[in-house]
């Protein structure tokens, strides 16, 4: 029997296929790197460079009214975080099916529905916390951050990016609420974590930390003027840190440019000393 002839693949075809596979893998790697960098930028904006509470100064009404304690700030912050992330996902999911003239009413309807769900959940399972937060849970609907992110970001970006944006913006707002609430509670009452049982249950009542007696507390910190002063101090601190970082980068770039632009061969010889 004669052996069947073998059809050999030309060397050029093999090299072309290998190059195509390599280009495809490089393209996928570049796409993953770009997506990762994009999400890092989204989180940096939400937490720092475009923080809703410290930079955009949105949602100031609940931010100033509720943050008498850290627990109150945490409760409102978690509610806002959920509504912001869920509304971004919902808006992004229907962005291609929504008529332009209907987008704002639909956005408000989505946000209001989610806020109603949160309000009913708090009233059912966290009744004491719901009574403490009061009208400020329903007022999440009027928080400009929610509508702004739905219109400026979620209505134009994919679902996953919109989810990251909602989580980043919500976490940034939550951080400001908790920090400001902790600051006011510490200065006004001398405690940290007071009322933790309202959010976490009876077992968390022992988590309250007494730093100094309440009679030594600063009453101004618990009043509305104290909320404005505390927020102003946080904004000033953020601006100071940002400016120091920018100055450091400018000095580093200037030093790097000066060192790189100097050629030892072009340096004139030192004049002789007499």
Image: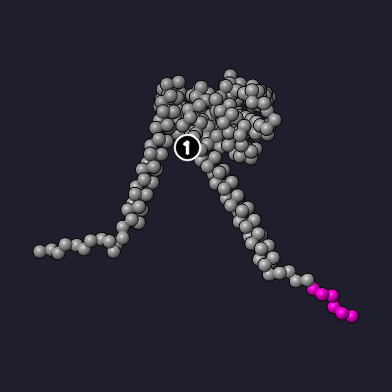
Residue at image point 56% right, 24% down: 143
In the rendered image, residue 88 lying in the magenta stretch gets the answer no
| Closer-to-camera residue (12/205) | 12
Horizontal arrangement in the rendering, residue 178 relative to residue 100 (left or right) = left
Q: Position of residue 145 (x, y in %)?
A: 55, 28
Tell me the quadrant of the picture where the C terminus can be found.
bottom left
Q: How many marks?
A: 1
Residue at image point 58% right, 52% down: 30
Horizontal arrangement in the rendering, residue 57 relative to residue 157 (left or right) = left
| Closer-to-camera residue (101/32) | 101
The residue under label 1 is 49
Q: Position of residue 198 (x, y in %)?
A: 60, 28
| Closer-to-camera residue (170/44) | 44
| Residue 88 placement: quadrant | top right
| Residue 136 placement: quadrant | top right
Residue at image point 64% right, 26% down: 100
Residue at image point 47% right, 37% down: 49
Horizontal arrangement in the rendering, residue 129 relative to residue 70 (left or right) = right
| Residue 2 placement: quadrant | bottom right
| Closer-to-camera residue (186/37) | 37
Dominant SS of magenta comes to: loop
Q: Residue furthest right?
A: 1
In the rendered image, residue 4 lying in the magenta stretch gets the answer yes
Horizontal arrangement in the rendering, residue 190 relative to residue 40 (left or right) = left
Q: Position of residue 44 (x, y in %)?
A: 51, 40
Q: Considering the numbered disc 1 on the image, is that residue within a helix, a strand or a loop?
A: helix
Q: Position of residue 255 (x, y in %)?
A: 33, 52
Q: Residue furthest bottom?
A: 1
Tell me the crowding category of disc 1: few under 14, some 14 to 19, or many 20 or more residues within 10 angstroms, Cα based. Answer: some
Tell me the quadrant of the picture where the N terminus can be found.
bottom right
User: Bounds of the magenta span?
Assistant: 1-6
Residue 98 shows in the view: yes
């Amino acid at each position: 029997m004669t052996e069947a002839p073998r059809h050999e693949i030309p060397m050029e075809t093999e090299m072309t296929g290998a190059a195509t596979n390599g280009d495809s893998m490089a393209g996928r790697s570049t796409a993953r790197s770009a997506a990762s960098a994009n999400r890092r930028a989204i989180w940096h904006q939400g937490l720092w460079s475009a923080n809703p509470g410290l930079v955009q100064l949105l949602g100031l009404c609940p931010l100033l009214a509720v943050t008498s304690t850290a627990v109150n700030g945490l409760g409102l912050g978690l509610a806002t975080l959920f509504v912001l992330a869920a509304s971004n996902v919902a808006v992004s999911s229907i962005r291609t099916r929504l008529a332009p003239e209907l987008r704002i009413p639909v956005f408000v309807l989505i946000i209001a529905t989610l806020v109603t769900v949160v309000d009913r959940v708090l009233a059912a399972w966290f009744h004491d916390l719901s009574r403490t937060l009061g009208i400020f849970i329903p007022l999440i609907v009027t928080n400009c951050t929610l509508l702004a992110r739905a219109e400026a970001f979620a209505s134009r970006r994919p679902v996953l990016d919109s989810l990251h944006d909602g989580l980043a913006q919500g976490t940034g707002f939550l951080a400001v609420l908790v920090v400001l609430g902790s600051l006011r509670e510490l200065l006004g009452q001398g405690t940290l974590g007071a009322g933790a049982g309202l959010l976490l249950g009876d077992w968390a009542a022992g988590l309250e930390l007494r730093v100094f007696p309440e009679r030594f507390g600063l009453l101004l910190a618990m009043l509305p003027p104290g909320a404005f002063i505390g927020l102003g101090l946080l904004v000033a601190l953020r601006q100071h840190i940002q400016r120091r970082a920018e100055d450091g980068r400018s000095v580093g770039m200037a030093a790097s440019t000066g060192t790189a632009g100097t050629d030892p061969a072009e340096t004139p010889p030192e004049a002789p000393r007499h």
